[in-house]
Image: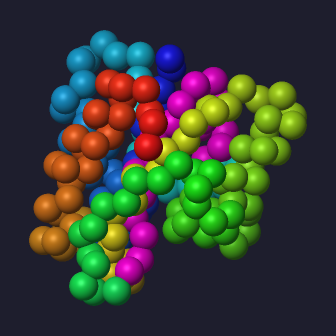
């Protein structure tokens, strides 16, 4: 089963770069020669869908904004279980949702994953420039990477 793992976010906007940091951690635990696709991206909607073409399943790691007391929590959801509107980078005001993009891609004949799992890390804001994660978000990198690695090892079934 061909799998891709994508870290979404902006690595120069502090906690918004958590998806990229998780992918860096995952990369250290995978064999050098692996058939698993690994990417860090700052795209959504149609552009994100294009990176999923040819894969059987996908794991997307992204951040989402919450109140301060929930920062650092981790949520795991199938894409189809998320509301079909902005789940942060999964969509854009100038594009469409990833759900709609995948549907369109399938209608156009693209081979796209049947299963897309989103692992979300709760952050408070994305308005501060910097490459460092806040302590509470940084603590989630290793557990989030292990969640993704476990999903790779087994058939995704949440």
Which residue is rendered at x = 76% and y = 53% of the image? 100
Q: Residue furthest front?
A: 158
Q: Is residue 106 magenta?
A: no
Which residue is rendered at x = 72% and y = 44% of the image? 102
Q: Report the side of 144 relative to 90 (left or right).
A: left
Q: Is residue 54 magenta?
A: yes
Magenta part of the protein: which range? 48-66
Query: In terms of depth relative to the viewer, which is nearer, 121 or 95?
Result: 121
Q: Quadrant of residue 56?
A: top right
- Image coordinates of residue 68 in percent, x first then y, are 27, 86
- Residue 37 visible somewhere in the drawing: no
- Image coordinates of residue 111 in percent, x first then y, are 72, 26
Which residue is rendered at x = 39% and y = 64% of the image? 63
Q: Quadrant of the C terminus?
A: top left
Q: Is residue 51 above or below residue 7?
A: above
Q: Residue furthest right?
A: 108
- Image coordinates of residue 76 in percent, x first then y, are 40, 53
- Image coordinates of residue 152 in percent, x first then y, are 36, 29
Q: Residue furthest bottom?
A: 68
Q: Quadrant of residue 133?
A: bottom left
Q: Is residue 154 above or below residue 14?
A: above
Which residue is rendered at x = 50% and y = 17% of the image? 1
Picture mark count = 0
Query: In terms of depth relative to the viewer, which is nearer, 1 or 77?
Result: 77
- Residue 28 visible somewhere in the drawing: yes
Q: Report the side of 157 relative to 32 (left or right).
A: right
């Amino acid at each position: 089963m061909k799998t891709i793992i994508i870290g979404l976010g902006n690595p120069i906007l502090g906690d918004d770069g958590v998806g990229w940091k998780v992918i860096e951690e995952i990369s250290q635990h995978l064999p050098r020669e692996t058939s698993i696709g690994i990417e860090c991206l700052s795209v959504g909607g149609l552009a994100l869908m294009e990176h999923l073409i040819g894969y059987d399943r996908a794991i997307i790691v992204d951040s989402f904004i919450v109140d301060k007391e929930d920062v650092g929590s981790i949520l795991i959801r199938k894409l189809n279980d998320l509301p079909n509107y902005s789940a942060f980078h999964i969509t854009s005001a100038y594009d469409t949702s990833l759900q709609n993009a995948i549907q369109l891609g399938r209608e156009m004949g693209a081979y796209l994953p049947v299963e897309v799992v989103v692992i979300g890390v709760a952050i408070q804001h994305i308005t501060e420039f910097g490459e460092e994660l806040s302590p509470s978000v940084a603590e989630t990198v290793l557990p989030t990477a292990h969640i993704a690695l476990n999903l790779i090892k087994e058939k995704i079934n949440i």
